[in-house]
Image (spheres, coloured by chain):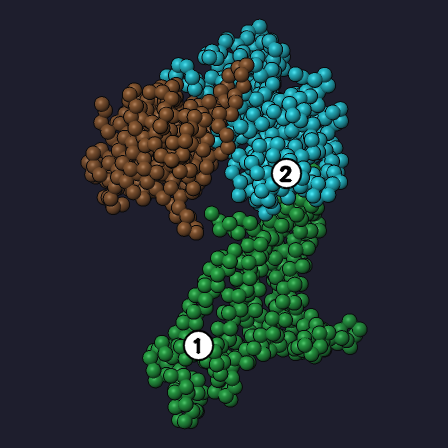
Chain colours: A brown, B green, C cyan
Amino acid sequence: MAETLLSARSLRKDYRLPRGQRLRAVDDVSLDVHAGEVLGVVGESGCGKSTLGRCLLRLTEASAGSLTFEGHDITGLSERALRPVRQRMQMVFQDSYASLNPRRRIGDLLAEPLRVHPDAHGRRRDMRAIEARLAELVDLVGLTPDALARYPHEFSGGQRQRINIARALALSPRLIVADEPVSALDVSIQAQIVNLFADLQARLGLTYVFIAHDLAVVRQISTRVAVMYLGAVVELGATDDVLHAPAHPYTSALIAAVPEPVVRADKLMPSLRGDVPSPVNPPPGCRFHTRCPVARPVCGQDAPTLRAVPDGRQVACHFPLAG
Amino acid sequence: MLMTILRRLGQTLFVLTGISVLVFGVFFATPGADPTARIAGRNASPQTMAQVRHEYGFDRPLPVQYATMMKKLFVTRDLTSYVDRGEKVVPEVFKAAPVTLSLVTGAAIIWVVVSITMGTLAAALRGSWVDRGLMMLGLIGISMPVFWVGQVANLLSQSRYHDTIVFRWVPALGYVPFTESPWGWFKALVLAWITLAILFIGLYSRVLRADLIAVSGEDFMRTARAKGLSPTRVLLRHGLRTSLVTFVSLFGMDFAQLVGGGALLTEVVFGLQGVGRLTYQALTNLDLPLIMATVMYSAVFVVIANALVDMVYIVLDPRVRDGRA
Amino acid sequence: MTGVEPILSVEGLSLAVPRGRTAMLPILENVSFSVGQGEILGIVGESGSGKSLTALTIMGLIDIPGARVTGSVRFRGRELVGLSQRAFRPLRGREIAMIFQDPMTAFTPVYTIGWQIDEQIRAHSRVSRAEARARTVRLLGDMGVPDPERAAGRYPHQLSGGLRQRAMIAMALSCNPSLLIADEPTTALDVTVQAQILELLRSLRRDYGSSVLLITHDMGVVAQTCDSTLVLYAGNLAERGPTEALFARPGHPYTAALLDSIPPLHGVRPSRLPSIGGAPPSPASRPPGCPFAPRCVHDHPACHDSRPPVVREGRQDVACVLPGEGRSLPLRLREAV
């Protein structure tokens, strides 16, 4: 078993709404991220996958629960104490344009973290070291060195996402949390970036938490997959198990709803009725029972907890379909 | 709905208390300044000084002084200005308020109607000479100082061309209460209304035009056109109706500001004894009770006007009604 | 499935917008296709391919000052290019209706859903308010909106994304249009909701006899929904044909590469995704020859002189020089499961 790089226990995130309402974006999530793996997180909008990603890096402060990174508890660390840890875990966002300051050259943007943080020996980097690192970074993400002197608007969406990745890599992190990194890109560009993520992982031994709503993309890159619904993980296991023989009815419905680029005699039929319920008032019992095709009376009363089934994956369902 | 109104009321009270404490602090609780001497006026007799000191409780702690002041302002309404020969100040404010309210409301009606017409027309004919002409007019309106426009209006209507048929109807400067003669009230104010409205017509028509043009790029405007609606209907029922939300918030602030005394220049030029002029007099004479009264009543007007605008907002925008959740 | 007389027939449609004082920038170039009675035609392309502008051009809704539309758009035999806005208005919403990508922003935020559907009904037929509302409620119910009476009284922001899109489709169908143009109707929706909306669109043909022009960037959506498919690249037609044939054996290198670059959900996971290098050209930087040539693995000198002619290849029409040279594309890298 590989080293556990990041571990979350009973993570919860509540948002206060007007009129005393509360939105539980992340509800009691526990998971481990092993060194060298790609943990895919999938789910529909409002399932809490992005909030979870931000909580894992403490970019958003969780309301409850604990976080361990490289064996050290980082839950209560102050911003200051967290800084050395921050270098080792980075984030890549969806909107490649919004996350780049339009008035600064790419070289500046990439150099900033290098100027702010000391190097591996605790020393400030000098100009030469920074320039050498910049050249390395643009090469890593497949850009030409002249990119450093240009501004964000001069690049296409795919190239900007490469720049974002380069910035996340600047301090040689071990863990990257990527939040919908390819969903704003055209299909032909999406494949390039997915490949880049895979290449970088192989070259640098990175660990990813890869958050996306696109099951096919997640399947392509992930070793394990966590499926989220209304703030909770409902199924977690090896990619091939979860996506080929789903145990949770929601996972199964989600897979069935994906329109594949293949023409068959039997057209895609809706697997679920209605929309995802509001996370402000999640249904009692199993949160999926209102849309579940195999729900039984007990599902409306008892909330199933995430538990291991014989084949090693975890499922939060009273009547799992597989495992 | 009721909760929203109650919450709004609570906020209003809180804001008013804040303002009163601040004003009281500045004029009465500033170390080194003796409010007794200020209120009693220059060369006041020792008896007057003693009377003032006792009446306002200046020999007692600050919170008591503040409470006394508020009681005199809002409950007994017998706050007296010794500078102004013992005049009670609250009735003075109440005498000035209708003047200002008449002036500002009339001007507001004019500027709202005219600026909506101008802004919508300009947006509908974007890029044409009508658009350019209207916006040029708007710019001229913004650039002309209100006291200058007022003086010119008076010069033309009161002296130079007063005897021509055009301006013969114009009465002498001053205010005629509506209850006395509605027609006289109208005649006395109409030039002042136009004068005050000019600046806002320029401002509002330009803002509205920009808003309408921005909104014309919205998805729902495209939907409206794709539904096969006429361009007029698309512009008015969908574009203008949506732009009104910004328009109203702008209007609320300006209206309140003017009612609270911001129409001073117009009041002075047209010889109207309004709240603005009263405040100005109070400040030049350092007439503390009058300052306190005008500032507090202005604050009340501003806050009430703001609350009204919020209500209109709630009516106009269903998203606000739902508490922006 | 395809009727004898097409509902919509587009011939050599081009759109150019002014750039600077004199130059014109081509956005759409010589696009031709037709939509038959009861047919669902998909137009796929990446951002900047001109797919949405094709729809707006057909609807006469291009409002870029100085834009020039040439070619022909015949709707039930009637020429739409050059039609005055006044003559266009009775067609819009009544004969050709349109639904848009984001139903949140596509409804006017300050009116209820019902009000907005009533408005469209009353714009095209002389009915009373009550009659219009009755029709609205019935339509919402037909579109699968639960409790349609109540939903009609709600504001756009109070409904979920799926319900909003159903309401949008109800509004589009309110005057029984013969052609429905759907511009990325499911892009803003979650997959489970998307499947419901696609099923609804397919059922329209059966229940209303409508023809649908579905614009999307998602090859999966096209495969599951459309009878025929048109692939656009950089404002030019790349390939056009029956969906089944086009997906089974693409005739244009772009279609083939695009299909290959989509990660599969079933079967063997490729260790690397076959990707297309580079990015689509902007309208100002389109090459004079085949617009896809700079990214194409089959690029050779014949591709560089002029736009390739549209030729028949199998059951498709393909804008590529390869078939003319007697070379057709190899079978797809990854076979369909």
Q: Dividing the picture into quarters, in which one does residue B157 lie?
A: bottom right
x and y percentages locating residue B180 in the rendered image: 69, 79
Q: Would residue C326 be seen by someone viewing this image from the given angle?
A: yes
Query: Disc 1, disc 2: CB below 8 Å?
Result: no
Left or right: residue C199 compared with residue A206: right
**B139 over B99 or under it: above or below:** above
x and y percentages locating residue C64 in the rendered image: 64, 37
Left or right: residue C188 compared with residue A210: right
Instruction: Name which residue lies at 45% across and 39% down.
Output: A278
Looking at the picture, tell me which residue is in the foreground, C44 or C252.
Answer: C44
Instruction: Name which residue lies at 47% across and 47% down.
Output: B325
Report the amino acid beneath label 2: Val
**B20 over C183 or under it: above or below:** below
Label 2 sits on a secondary structure element that is helix
Badge 1 and badge 2 in a common chain = no
User: Label 1 crowding class (10 Å Cα cut-off): few <14, some 14-19, many 20+?
Assistant: many
From the image, state whether disc 1 or disc 2 is nearer to you: 2
**A181 over C275 or under it: above or below:** below
Q: Point out the residue furthest to the right here.
A: B165
**C257 over A230 or under it: above or below:** above
Instruction: Name which residue lies at 65% across and 16% down.
Output: C1
x and y percentages locating residue A15 in the rendered image: 38, 45
Instruction: Name which residue lies at 29% across and 42% down.
Output: A64
Which residue is labeled 1 in the image?
Answer: B70
Which residue is labeled 2 in the image?
Answer: C137
Report the amino acid beneath label 1: Met
User: Label 2 crowding class (10 Å Cα cut-off): few <14, some 14-19, many 20+?
Assistant: many
Q: Dividing the picture into quarters, in which one does residue A231 lie?
A: top left
